[in-house]
Image (cartoon, rainbow, N blue to C red):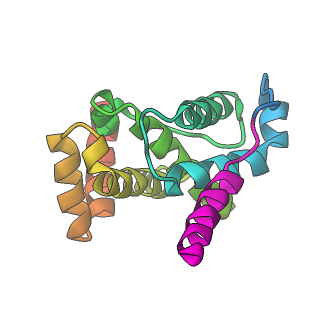
Amino acid sequence: MKSILLYAFSLVSMNIMAQPDIEDVVIRNAEDAHDELETVEECADWILSASYNPNDPTWDQMSGFILNWARHTNEFPIRMRTELTGFMKKNPVLMSVYLAGWIRFAIHHPEARGNELNCTDAALTSCVQFYSTHKEQLKTDPTMDQLVDVSDQGELILWIAKELRELDSRSR
């Protein structure tokens, strides 16, 4: 019995310790965003790995932090094309997941920061994984279900490339 309680306590402690300390962090400009690169990476990792509970205020804090950071950075050209991210209307938490996936990819692959295809693939892959893992806590979304199927077939990046080509050709 002691070992079960100790194990449960250690899991809770690990989850608490894994939360980035963002309470006193203020980001007002690009320089502040640059100074908090490590913190935003920790925040992205937390968003992509923590259990989702829509009633946990930590989710709002982490989501707000990553959104504010994304608004102020000039090192990371983050692009959210509404044609590819309309699913966020049903499940707004997926915006934070998208940003977290994009940011984490761009941090780990600085040479690809401006590569919209690869960054979008990382962002949408994060959304697909999050949606699949936390489907019980999210609203059912046929668009996300379709993306899950495309991802399961190993064709998500091909789908994204096709969509980006079509969007780019329409804008000319």
Q: Is residue 10 magenta?
A: yes
**On the rendered structure, is 166 left or right of 2?**
left
**Picture quadrant where residue 150 is located:** bottom left
The residue shown at (58%, 71%) is 7
Q: Residue at x 29, y 56 (%)?
A: 132
Direction from residue 34 to residue 135 in the image, left or right:
left
The reply to whether the magenta stretch includes residue 130 is no
Q: Is residue 167 visible?
A: yes
Q: Nearer the viewer, residue 111 or 39?
A: 39
- Image quarter in which the C terminus is found: top left
Residue 76 in which image quadrant: top right
Provide residue 79's location: percent of width, then percent of height: 49, 38
Position in image of residue 1 (x %, y %): 53, 75
Between residues 79 and 35, which one lies in front from this camera angle? Answer: 35
Say whether residue 113 is visible. no
Seen from the viewer's position, the closer of residues 163 and 124 is 124
Q: Residue furthest top?
A: 28
Residue 60 at x, y percent in the picture:
54, 30
Q: Which residues are magenta?
A: 1-22
Q: Main secondary structure of the magenta part?
A: helix
Q: On screen, 172 above or below 149?
A: above
Question: Percent position (x, y) of residue 12?
Answer: 60, 57
Q: How many marks?
A: 0
**Relative depth, front residue between 48 and 53:** 53
